Amino acid sequence: MSRFFMHFWSDELCDVHYRAGFSGSPIEFTAGDGFVRAGIQPGDVVYIISVYDGQVMLIGRMTVGKVLTSYSEAVAMIAPEVEEAPEYLLAAEGIATEQYFTRQLMMEEAGDLRLLTADGSTKPLKFADDEEVDEHALTGVHEIAPASAIILDQVLSQPFHDQHPDTEDGDDEDEIDDADLAAISRSFGDEDTNRRVQSAAMDFVVGAFEEKGWTVMPVDDPEEGYDLQCTVGDDHLHVVVKGNANDALEFMLTELEYARAERDGHFALCLVSGALSGSPSLTTFSGDDLYDLFDARPVKWAFRYRDEEASDTEDF
């Protein structure tokens, strides 16, 4: 079973990478020491973090493919000009997020993170005061609890782009504006219609897969982030089913579904258009397709009351 770690990059290193234009490129490796001592092995997941002005910055995530313990190995496997360090972690091929250097965790998210101690218990991050984390307590490498990895994965699932100093005005990536968002929201109809659309879409997808020889099993746990487990021979897919009453290629994803699309190589989204018509159509997309073919915008926020013991609300 994979273990989860955080590795600290200094603000100076992040600034060098940022100004060198590494924003948006996948994390290929991380250098430092303490990896072997911490027990990091191939298959473990490492989150790269930094701290700027007392705030935790989440740079990205990599799944470890190889652990190197000498500079000569790093020169041979990474690049001749690689920085010298006692140890290196190489990302498994194709299993690393893009790196961004200005992605800030909310204080509530940082406060919910838990480090694992030597005896298996957990402890929160150390804060210098109510508004800043203790940077020195985060340097090096730290194992984190699986629940903390979920928090970081949810942050990474959100679309994000650094604003590089060289970016010109007007070069921003196209996104869904407020008018488009309102139109998309209206297109899904009322709650009863949406329920019937989703039920019809689910039946259609199950029938389509079974007709082609797949074994289809429903997934009842919403925390899995997908609806159907489909297998045929040695192949398997984790399928999210979405339906539309109209013919538009539009849909909503939950945070967990979006996170699944980003990290799961077996993810598939099956969109049934015209689900309540006599001739519905099925289109299937991979996780990469969601990034390459669609514009996206988050439409929901989760709120938690900051002080559970005090309430300063007004009754109407």
Image (cartoon, grey):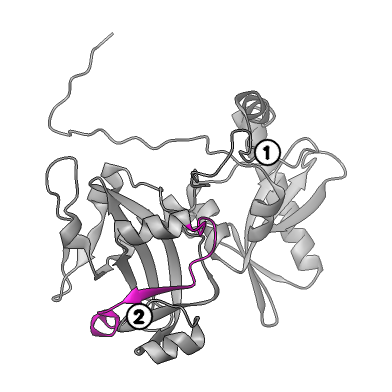
Crowding at mark 1 (Cα within 10 Å: few <14, some 14-19, many 20+): some
Instruction: Say which quarter of the image contains residue 230.
Output: bottom right
Q: Give the alpha-carbon distance from disc 2 to disc 1, as whole Å.
A: 60 Å
Q: Does the stretch in magenta take in 14? A: no
User: Which of the labelled discs sits on residue 13, or is there none?
Assistant: none
Q: Of discs 2 and 1, which sits in the foreground? A: 2
Mark 1: amino acid: Arg
Residue at image mark 1: 196
On screen, residue 121 versus residue 174, left or right, reads left
Q: Does the stretch in magenta take in 27? A: yes
State the residue at coordinates (57%, 46%). 253
The chief SS type of the magenta part is loop
State the residue at coordinates (46%, 78%). 81
Q: Which residue lies furthest to the right in this view?
A: 279
Residue 145, horizontal then vertical, whole percent? 28, 65
On screen, residue 149 versus residue 128, left or right, reads right
User: Which of the labelled discs sits on residue 84, or is there none?
Assistant: 2
Above or below, 43 against 99 in this view is below
Residue 26, horizontal then vertical, whole percent? 53, 65
- The magenta segment: 20-40
Mark 2: amino acid: Glu
Quadrant the C terminus occupies? top left
